[in-house]
């Protein structure tokens, strides 16, 4: 049985690796919040080994005998050969496909940092050691999914590029309408919208009603800022949503823009991006951060000479273990 609080060794390793960083929270509030999701996953297991620790759980949404792994930390003296031997021994105990890292839900983004500019981590960004990317990549994953975070301080360029799309879709009734995550009418509608937008994604895990309520209630408390959520509407129809997060220093973090499948790849996303950057401009936002965007996401097709990459990340898919 998984304990209700994160294991002591995990907390000690994280303190050892990250306590010197200004963003380190000695109370590990976000860790405790995420751990509660992990404990509820099917067949959750905690591995406490010589070289590393990790959480493992069944991920049936990604296929039978598929496992997710996360909460991955190593000892500082972990040698690559020793790690490989221990990793393979653990995989032999759970011989299906593996995907990760994940914290216990696809609603809790967690990726291994591969390259780091040294820019401060933002609220909601899970810190990892770049050394972990090298260790995991050396285990020959069948697929590596790349992500990046970037920042922009001048929004006029992206607004200009988006304007034709915004004009066209505004003529068809496009508008952003406030979405209140505390509104009893909005909550089930948002949950249904998220499932409809992302349900077909590989490894997506829908939340139970209680899990969704816990995630929704945590939007502000875990990040120390103000969530900005909007419905994407065409007339009276809700066809998507956006989730941004405003920090006290004038930063706005772009978390998610999600559209129903039938409205994707039609330029509506460009219109939403333009409208959101106009909103950021009106708020006198000093910079926008685009957090953990998959590198092959369509949003990356927009011109980006005026953005700066601040971090790159990876997630991994391993085929079933072969003895």
Image (cartoon, rainbow, N blue to C red):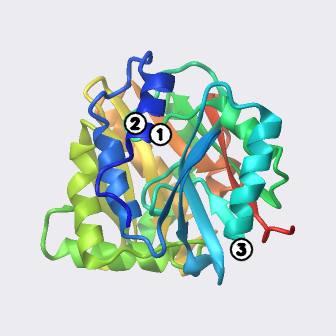
- Mark 2 or mark 1: whose residue is earlier in sequence: 2
Looking at the rendering, in which quadrant would you find the N terminus?
Answer: bottom left
Which of 103 and 302 lies nearest the eye of the viewer? 103
Q: CA distance from mark 3 to mark 2?
A: 28 Å
Element under label 1?
loop
Q: Are marks 2 and 1 in contact (CB under 8 Å)?
A: no
Q: What mark, if any, has residue 258 been given in the picture?
A: none
Element under label 2?
helix
- Mark 3 or mark 2: whose residue is earlier in sequence: 2
- Nearer the observer: mark 3 or 1; the answer is 3
Q: Are marks 3 and 2 in contact (CB under 8 Å)?
A: no
Looking at the image, which residue is at 53% across and 72% down?
204
Which of 100 and 264 lies nearest the eye of the viewer? 100
Q: Which residue is mark 2?
A: 11
- Mark 3 or mark 1: whose residue is earlier in sequence: 3
Which of 57 and 234 lies nearest the eye of the viewer? 57
Element under label 3?
loop
Q: Is residue 322 visible?
A: yes
Looking at the image, which residue is at 44% across and 38% down?
9
Q: What mark, if any, has residue 126 been given in the picture?
A: 1
Looking at the image, which residue is at 87% across and 67% down?
323
Q: Residues within 10 Å of mark 1 (few under 14, many from 20)?
A: some
Q: What mark, if any, has residue 96 been given in the picture?
A: 3
Q: Residues within 10 Å of mark 2 (few under 14, many from 20)?
A: some
């Amino acid at each position: 049985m998984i304990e209700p609080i994160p294991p002591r060794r995990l907390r000690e390793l994280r303190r050892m690796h990250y306590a010197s960083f200004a963003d380190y929270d000695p109370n590990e509030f976000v860790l405790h919040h995420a751990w509660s999701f992990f404990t509820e996953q099917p067949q959750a297991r905690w591995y406490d080994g010589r070289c590393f620790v990790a959480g493992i759980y069944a991920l049936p949404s990604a296929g039978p005998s598929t496992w997710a792994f996360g909460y991955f930390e190593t000892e500082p003296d972990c040698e690559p050969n020793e790690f490989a031997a221990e990793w393979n021994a653990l995989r032999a105990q759970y011989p299906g496909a593996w995907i990760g890292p994940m914290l216990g839900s696809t609603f809790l983004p967690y990726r291994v940092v591969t390259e780091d500019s040294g820019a401060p981590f933002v609220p909601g960004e899970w810190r990892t050691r770049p050394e972990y990317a090298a260790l995991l990549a050396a285990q020959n994953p069948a697929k590596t999914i790349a992500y990046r975070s970037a920042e922009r301080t001048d929004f006029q360029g992206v607004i200009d590029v988006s304007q034709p799309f915004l004009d066209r879709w505004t003529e068809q009734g496009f508008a952003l309408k406030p979405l209140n995550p505390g509104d009893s009418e909005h909550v089930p509608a948002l949950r249904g919208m998220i499932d409809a937008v992302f349900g077909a994604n590989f490894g997506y895990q829908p939340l139970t009603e209680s899990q969704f309520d816990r995630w929704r209630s945590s939007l502000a408390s875990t990040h120390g800022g103000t969530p900005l959520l909007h419905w994407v509407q065409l007339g009276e129809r809700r066809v998507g949503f956006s989730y941004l997060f405003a920090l006290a220093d004038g930063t706005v973090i772009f978390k998610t823009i999600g559209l129903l499948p039938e409205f994707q790849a039609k330029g509506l996303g460009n219109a939403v991006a333009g409208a959101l950057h106009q909103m950021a401009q009106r708020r006198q936002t000093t910079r926008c951060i685009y957090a953990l965007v998959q590198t092959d996401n369509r949003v990356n097709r927009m011109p980006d000479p005026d953005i700066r990459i601040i971090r790159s990340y990876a997630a991994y898919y391993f085929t079933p273990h072969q003895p």
